[in-house]
Amino acid sequence: MAYSGFRLIREALTGHKGWKPAWRDPEPQAHYDVVVVGGGGHGLATAHYLAKNFGKTRIAVLEKGWIGGGNVGRNTTIIRSNYLLPGNEPFYELSLQLWEGLEQDLNYNAMVSQRGIMNLFHTDAQRDAFRRRGNSMILHGSDAELLDREGVKREAPFLNFDNARFPIKGALMHRRGGTVRHDAVAWGYARSADRYGVDIIQNCEVTGFKIENGKIRGVETSRGTIGAEKVGVAVAGSSGKVMSYAGLRLPIESHVLQAFVSEGLKPMIPGVITFGAGHFYVSQSDKGGLVFGGDIDGYNTYAQRGNLPVVEDVCEGGMAIMPMIGRTRLLRMWGGIMDMSMDGSPIIDRTPIEGLYFNGGWCYGGFKATPASGLTFAHLLATGGPHATAEALRFDRFEKGLMIDEKGAGAQPNLH
Amino acid sequence: MIIPHPLLGPRDAQEFVYLGDASLLDRPDWQHPEAGSAYYEYLYLRDNPAGVHRELWFHEQGDRSWLVVTRDTTTHEILSAELASQVALSKEPVR
C-alpha cells in the first residue's frame, strides 16, 4: 500500500479503517540466500538495497528485539557529511545524498530536515583546522562555509560569545547537514524491504553461526537454525559479542554514549550546534525538546546506561556555551552502546570465514551513515567486492598501518 | 561506580582514568620473529566481552597507582581491584 496525500484523504473520509500493518510478521523459513543479522537502521537499509538495487530475493533480517529498538532509536538524529579524510568523506557524502532522496525512495515521511550544522571554534589553530576540513569537504562535493564571529551571531545570537575559557571566534557551517526522525528511518526501511519481499523476523536472537570447512552455512537462533548462503552482520554495539560466536576478535571496544532530551520549549535553536571543546552538541526537535549529548563515558560496557559524572560534564558544557538553558528541566536521558573502533572509523568488509560479512565499528557516527552503510554493505553482500566509496573501510587497515584516523582517537585518545 | 582500591579503600571512579583490557599488561617481546603480528593483536584486537572484564584503571587524582579492576560490563558491578604491579609481577615473562 503506497502512502500519498490522496490515500490520506480517502482514509480520513472512511474513518481510517483501511490502514494495514507496515510490514508482515513472518515465520522464519528454513533457508535464505542472504541473512542479515540485526534489524536496526543499517540491517534494514542493507535488506532494502539488496532487494531494490541488486534484485536479490529470499532475504531475511533477524532482530533480537523489535525493529527500531536498538541504536537507531537511541541516537541524536543528526545527519552530516563534514569529514576530512579521503577514506571517509566520499562515503558520508554518498550517505547525505541518499538522505536527500530517501523519502521518495522509501515512500515514507522520515522528516529529513536540512537545517544546518555549526561546529564552533575558539582559537586560531582550531579555525585553521576547520578551514582545512571545510576545503576537504568542498573538494569531495559537500558544502562548507567558514563563519566569523558576526556570522555565528546572526545564526545563534543566544550563545555565550565571551566565555572566558572558550570565546566563540567563528564556526564551520555545513548547511546540508541536519536531522531526521530516527524511528521513521527504521520503519521506512523496514516497510520498503518488506514490500520487496524481505522477511523481517523479530524476537529472533542469533546465538551462533553454522560454519563448515571455513564456509558459512547458516545461523543458530532462538527460533531454530536458519540456513543461508551469505550472512551479513550489522549489529554495531554488540559486534564484539556476536562475532565472538564465529571465533573472531575485532579491533573494537563497546562503550556507552549518553544522550538527553529536555522538556518541550518554543523554537529557539535553528540547527545543530556543536561545542566540541566542551563536549556538548545540541539541536531542537520538532516537538520542542532540546536534544543534546556529549562524549562517551569512557569504559567498556554493554549496559545501555551511563553514569552521572558524564551527565554533569555534558550539562556543564551546555551551560558554558548556552547559559539560557539553565532553568530548563531534563526530561529523559539514556545510553546507547557504541562499537568504538581503534581509529574511530567504521568497518564494512569480508571476514576470514567465507560468506560471512561484517558491518560495524561505527563509533558515535552510525546514524548518519545508515543509507550509505546499507547500500555499500548490500553491494558487498551481492557482489562479494567492496563498493567504491567503502574500499578503505577494511579490517586489515590496522595491520597495514592504513588507519583512517579522522580525530586521531578511537576508543581511547592515546591509541595513536 | 566505586572502585575498592586495595590501599586506599573505596574511591569514586571519577578519580581514575580508564585504559582498557588488562591484557595490555602482556606486552609482546619485540625481538621475537613474529613480533609484527603479535603487536598487531596486542595493540588493536580486543576480546570485548559482555560480562566479566579485567581492565586497567589509573588512579590519577589519587596515589597514581595502576589497578586491575574486575568489572561486569553488563551491570557495571565491580567485583575486585588489585594493584597492577602485583598482577604483573605474578605473571610469567612473556615470550
Image: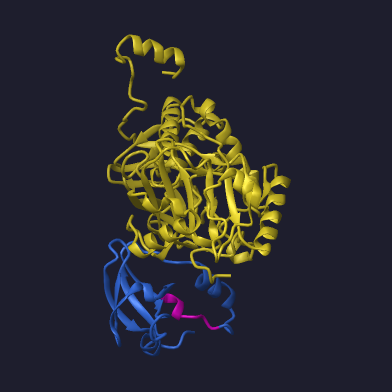
Indicate the position of residue B84 as horizontal and vertical percent values.
38, 84
Quadrant for residue A299, please give it: bottom left
Q: Is residue A213 above or below residue B48?
A: above
- Of A166 and B81, which appears nearest the observer? A166
- Of A129 and B20, which appears nearest the observer? A129
Q: Is residue A311 above or below residue A148?
A: below
- Of B18 and A258, which appears nearest the observer? A258
User: In this rendering, would A139 be left or right of A17?
Assistant: right
How many circles with numbers are drawn on the protein?
0
- Of B31 and A172, which appears nearest the observer? A172
Chain identifier of the blue chain:
B
Name the image colouring.
by chain
Residue A369 seen from this side: no
Indicate the position of residue A104 as horizontal and vertical percent values.
53, 25
Indicate the position of residue A252 as horizontal and vertical percent values.
47, 61
Residue displayed at 33% across by 55% down: A304
Residue displayed at 47% across by 36% down: A47
Quadrant for residue A310, please give it: bottom left
Specify the quadrant that holds the N terminus of chain A. top left
Chain identifier of the yellow chain:
A
Q: Is residue B45 magenta?
A: no
Q: Is residue A68 above or below residue A260?
A: above
Q: Is residue A348 above or below residue A192?
A: below
Query: In the image, which residues are magenta?
Result: B22-29
Indicate the position of residue A329 as horizontal and vertical percent values.
33, 49
Quadrant for residue A277, please give it: bottom right
Residue A394 seen from this side: yes
Specify the quadrant that holds the C terminus of chain A. bottom right
